[in-house]
Image (cartoon, helix red, strand yellow):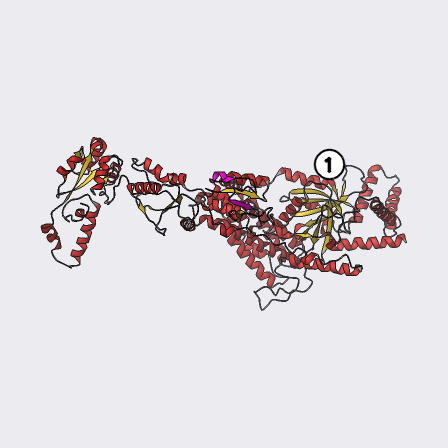
Amino acid sequence: MAENSALTSTTGSTSLADSSILDSKVTETSKENLFIGSTSYVEEEMPQIETRIILVQEAGKQEELIKALKEIKMPFVKMESVEEFKSLDSPEFENVFIVMDFQDSVFNELYKTDCRVIGPPVVLNYAQKGEPLPFSCRPLYCTSMMNLVLCFTGFRKKEELVRLVTLVHHMGGVIRKDFNSKVTHLVANCTQGEKFRIAVSLGTPIMKPEWIYKAWERRNEQDFCASFDEFRNEFKVPPFQDCILSFLGFSDEEKTNMEEMTEMQGGNYLPVGDERCTHLIVEENIVKELPFEPSKKLYVVKQEWFWGSIQMDARAGETMYLYEKANTPELKKSVSLLSLNTPNSNRKRRRLKETLAQLSRETDMSPFPPQTPKSCTKSSKNSTPVPSKQSARWQVARELYQTESNYVNILATIIQLFQVPLEEEGQRGGPILAPEEIKTIFGSIPDIFDVHTKIKDDLEDLIVNWDESKSIGDIFLKYSKDLVKTYPPFVNFFEMSKETIIKCEKQKPRFHAFLKINQAKPECGRQSLVELLIRPVQRLPSVALLLNDLKKHTAEENPDKSTLEKAIGSLKEVMTHINEDKRKTEAQKQIFDVVYEVDGCPANLLSSHRSLVQRVETISLGEHPCDRGEQVTLFLFNDCLEIARKRHKVIGTFRSPHGQTRPPASLKHIHLMPLSQIKKVLDIRETEDCHNAFALLVRPPTEQANVLLSFQMTSEEPPKENWLKMLCRHVANTICKADAENLIYTADPESFEVNTKDMDSTLSRASRAIKKTSKKVTRAFSFSKTPKRALRRALMTSQSSVEGRSPSSNDKHVMSRLSSTSSLAGIPSPSLVSLPSFFERRSHTLSRSTTHLI
């Protein structure tokens, strides 16, 4: 009967899809003139067959169904029992039986006799579309799975598999035994096997068997399709189905978060070491070796497997993420060059110097070394070699280029690592974010990247072909309009971008996993996307400060002097377009508190872009920045480090202009150091003779020598590890580097002759007291400045006496102020004194003090 449906006349009216196919073939044949008169031949030789609908039992009582058949003018008859089938059978009709229930005996009889059987939803759907009824050699109840190709895996019970296959056929789906690229869905009863792995690699949706059962329950819904995302996502196999996970090396907060994610993704978790666990997730950066010998059945994988599975919305292959025992890092390669066994102190000093030089070479981030920049591929005929001792202007220009290059790399990381993958079509598991969410998060980042790439290229050409007369200000004036166009849209809506990231991370597990995977990559330096996106907010103020510094080191006769002023003005114009409300009043108040607490604190510490990050109390362990044993307070700001020591004697109080009395300054300013001068942060290992110690390798930009500053933290808050990470993070932000962790270097205390053993001993305290006394005695017997001060006071006194009056208390105050002002007139600001020269001056003073005491 099914074969007869193909013999329909081209002129006869029919509602069968297969007959229309024959019509087209016959028409094409006649056009090609392969045989003439073929159409008339079909009409004469083959009888016309008309499609007729037979409503079986309950189907004949459905008014909606009968109404649809009348609308499409389809002939139909009713049949109450199978016995009537013989009387209805006729070669003139292609009978199509409509049965309400595909489980009763009437359906089974019709199926055995190879009759065409369909369900009411098929007629209703195609009548609504105005399309011919589909042809199917199998019973077709509805079209919920029409055009879907399914494959099965993991089913051991044949009866269950047969039942599922039958339902798929009843809903119009196609079954394939072997998995290939045409398969649209894999129905899996387990998360293992070759078919499962291929489906994961191709991004094919992997469904639970319940998907088919639930789709069959909704078979009478006309507009329902089993492939609708909202319905299908309810029955996708979760990534951690059949998995029992345990977590090793994570903090309590991270572990809790991952355990919650495990349950959300269909898995379970147990403590580490439980024999029922199928997977052990390891934080590979912390765990160096496992606490037990894992069984062969246990997968020991890196955390990337966990987050990758969530991002793909399917269990990732474990072989790509297996945890391997890390080799002990060779930390002593460059720091263990010293040996305490050698009695020769000169040799120790030489080796210490070599150690610092080695660290300096490793941490020199400049593509242009102090010598001629041979490493640059670009060259010019007019380029002149840079002298071994560069000018301060060249040094600042080089720092401007370095930070610009690093900033461009950060922007490239944001685009390539985050934005492009999120915008990519054909993502496994579907799009991670909606297009409007991506636009809100990244905004004008690509435009900012394009502008700064051009600025970086121009700066590179200028540095390579350096000449003091070349203008740096022209570069920023050239792109000022582009900066005005690109920055305000991003900076003003940064808070919205940040809120969108936080909201999507909470609501969308796949986006959370996406961030976890990418933020752990070296390009990000373990920074979050929010931390990376804040760089454009910070960049323009940093450029303005560098241009100001460049202007200070530019001669008055240099044409670039005025150009730099214009460039700084253009940057200020850009920043006026940016929302000023982003400044935090509390952060500014904290800076004023530091200025009041530290005697001699530089005024340039006050800046609108600067904020206090952390205060740490320490003790100096070396000769720099002050004597060993001195109490030193470190104020970490977002771009600089204020170093102050405890005052030996506190005099007077400070009264503010508003009449409020402040306590006297308890600290004395030593040095305000830009974070860019810190080349390495040394984490000194804990030993019996050394506790809570760390050191900073400092290299001022205008000097060739390195200086080592070593300290011991005197409080447990913040913990040393947190403090060092925080310090490195802000150093990296200042120099626009992502890999902040590379700035930390673990070292043995013997390598740098650092120890804290005698810090609290009586002998040590007495030694420090003697040093302080010797300094006071030296100042008392120094004749270099006393006559000058005495002469000045005598001059002031005699001048007042000539006028016929003795100096009043106010006059004495004014005189003392004039005296102190005149004495400081020839001394540069402490913040402008380079660190090595400052240390050299202190060493000279100490040696002179020793001579006076002798």
Task: Identify the image quadrant of the C terminus.
Answer: bottom right
Q: Quadrant of residue 332?
A: bottom right
Viewer-proximal residue among 403 and 824: 403
Quick one: 265 or 478, which is closer to the camera?
A: 265
Looking at the picture, how far across and down is residue 28, in whole percent?
A: 19, 55
- Mark 1, Cα crowd under 10 Å, few <14 / some 14-19 / many 20+, is few
Q: Find residue 230 and report its horizontal and vertical position in percent.
A: 39, 39
Q: Nearer the viewer, residue 234 or 737?
A: 234
Q: Amino acid at mark 1?
A: Ser
- In the displayed structure image, the side of residue 570 where residue 131 appears, left or right: left
Query: Residue 213 sits in which quadrant?
Result: top left
Give how far across and how far down residue 372 sits, in percent. 64, 65
Q: Circle 1 is placed at which residue position?
A: 656
Q: Quadrant of residue 375?
A: bottom right
Q: Is residue 495 left or right of residue 164?
A: right
Query: In this view, which residue lies farthest toward the right?
Result: 854
Q: Position of residue 178 (x, y in %)?
A: 35, 51
